[in-house]
Amino acid sequence: MMKWIEIQATFWLEILTRAVLSVIFLELEQTPPFVRKIHIDELWLYKNPRTPSYVPTSILWPLVFIVPTSVMLLYFLVKRDRTELCQGLFALSLALGLNGVITNIIKLIVGRPRPDFFYRCFPDGHEDLGNVIDIGSVCTGEAHTIQEGRKSFPSGHSSFSFCSLGFLSLWIFGKLSVFSKRRGQGWRLVVGMAPIILALMVALSRTSDYHHHWQDVLVGSVLGLFISYLCYRQYYPRLTSPHCHLPYLMVPTVIQPKCANGIPMKEFPKFLDPESPIEEQVKWM
């Protein structure tokens, strides 16, 4: 009975954690960023034309949420294992929640203008700046457009796409045992890399439509990929483990013999792989 209560408490605590992260993310979305001064001599950095997003949010969010979730649901329809599905969704949702909060915090603190900020500031493009020191102080554009124009670093599209699709790549690598039992089979590597290649395309598009500087895209991509790996390893063993296709909760218990060659042996923790040295179990790489 106590074990069941503990499991239920852990489950709802996991749900609560993601709910809190979601609320914080939504609040940060509406928070004004730091207003950084833009001097005339650096104006060329922010005077690129305004163009529509190659990957608008109407495409990004389904890509980020629906694609990896759909792959996991398809796997569930084959395996019919609720624990596996639950652990996968927990890991993914934690990664997305953390990524959203951390990305927005950095955006608000840095307040870097986007490459097209000038035309967000002056929609007609014909403003006599004269001796103005900070062009941001004399903007004539819409307040919301200008506010969004100050959230360039890091790229949210890049961090979310690499967080979500990067996680999906790690998940596929584990399910296909690409780096453990299935080495030497190139098609498995290609299948696993497909989501992360798609994430790369989304990230690079943000420089082509002048919505982000290349530094924004680079940092956003690294941030998203790091968070995805961190959360993946919170729920799944390393990719070189014989049990990399299973979450920690489903890794078989190791029954250690009481003695070897007449010498008593201490018990090993339950999550250790019998085929690997003890120290290998705690490595994150």
Image (spheres, rainbow, N blue to C red):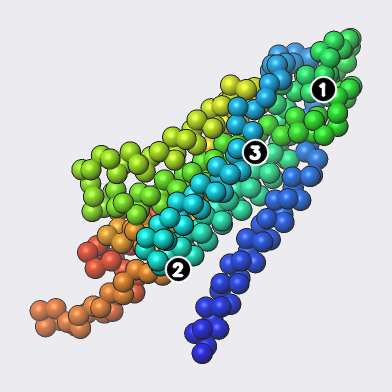
Can residue 272 be seen here? The reply is: yes
Dot 2, how many residues are within 10 Å of its Cα: few (below 14), some (14-19), or many (20+)?
A: few
Q: What residue occupies the far bottom of the structure in this picture?
A: 1
Disc 3 from disc 2: Cα separation: 30 Å
Expressed as whole percent of the image width and height from the top left, the position of residue 235 reads 45, 61
Identified by mark 1, the residue type is Cys
* Nearest to N terminus: mark 1 or mark 3: 3
Disc 1 from disc 3: Cα separation: 25 Å
Q: Nearer the viewer, mark 1 or mark 3?
A: 3
Q: Nearer the viewer, residue 260 or 31?
A: 31
Relative side of 25 to 276, left or right = right
Q: Which residue does the image show at 67% across and 24% down from the upper left?
A: 52
Identified by mark 3, the residue type is Ser
Mark number for residue 121?
1
Whether 90 is drawn above or below 252: the answer is above
Per the image, label 1 sits on a secondary structure element best described as helix
Q: Quadrant of residue 145?
A: top right
Q: Nearer the viewer, residue 207 or 258?
A: 207
Expressed as whole percent of the image width and height from the top left, the position of residue 147 reads 80, 33
Identified by mark 2, the residue type is Arg
Relative side of 29 to 96, left or right = right
Per the image, label 3 sits on a secondary structure element best described as helix
Q: Which residue does the image show at 38% across and 50% down from the upper left?
A: 172
Mark number for residue 58?
3
Asked if labels 1 and 2 touch by Cβ distance under 8 angstroms, the answer is no
Q: What residue sits right under mark 2 in the picture?
A: 82
Relative side of 64 to 180, left or right = right
* Nearest to N terminus: mark 2 or mark 1: 2
Mark number for residue 219?
none
Expressed as whole percent of the image width and height from the top left, the position of residue 277 reads 25, 63
Per the image, label 2 sits on a secondary structure element best described as helix
Can residue 282 be seen here? The reply is: no
